[in-house]
Amino acid sequence: MIIRIKKDGEDTNEWAIIELQGDLESRTNQSLNDQFIGDLHYTKTGTPILIVGHHILYGKEVSLDKPFAVLEKIHYNENDQVVDKSMSDSRTRTEYTVRAIVKKKLVFRVRPKPIIANVPKMV
């Protein structure tokens, strides 16, 4: 079996993996797939900061020993038209396209710190 892997003509994006220690749960116990969980920022010195709700996490950037490729699986029919995977059969061919390369990960190992607003004292 031949599996074709091709790269788009444009520059390949570079992504990073975010590694968190512990569990990330929602208050309603719903799945976090495709959900917004927080904001990622960098300090002037390049330290990654992740803000999740009312908590802040400080991390570090680590290079991976072996990079990963993010692939997209595409099915084509006999006329080289893209078809839905549910319609793929023995007459379709499959190609994988490189969408991104993952060369680094952002590691957040420390406990999150609460973000406390400066509330003025009442006199």
Image (spheres, rainbow, N blue to C red):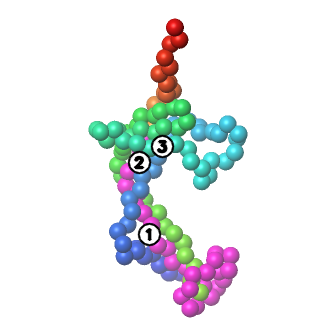
Mark 2 lies on residue: 105
How far apart are the alpha carbons under marks 2 and 3?
16 Å
Q: Is residue 95 magenta?
A: yes
Q: Is residue 63 above or below residue 26?
A: below
At label 2, the amino acid type is Lys
Q: Which residues are magenta?
A: 78-107
Q: Is residue 112 above or below residue 121?
A: below
Q: Nearer the viewer, residue 88 or 79?
A: 79
Number of numbered callouts drawn: 3
Q: State the image coordinates of residue 45 (x, y, percent, origin top left).
A: 28, 38
Under circle 2, the secondary element is strand
At label 3, the amino acid type is Asp
Which of the labelled discs sits on residue 98, or is there none? Answer: 1
Q: State the image coordinates of residue 51 (x, y, percent, origin top left).
A: 48, 37
Of pointers 2 and 3, the one earlier in the residue sequence: 3
How far apart are the alpha carbons under marks 3 and 1?
26 Å
Residue 107 figure quarter: top left
Q: Nearer the viewer, residue 50 or 66?
A: 50
Q: Nearer the viewer, residue 16 or 4?
A: 16
Mark 3 lies on residue: 39
Q: Does 4 sit left or right of 91 as displayed?
A: left
Under circle 3, the secondary element is strand
Of pointers 3 and 1, the one earlier in the residue sequence: 3
How far apart are the alpha carbons under marks 1 and 2?
19 Å
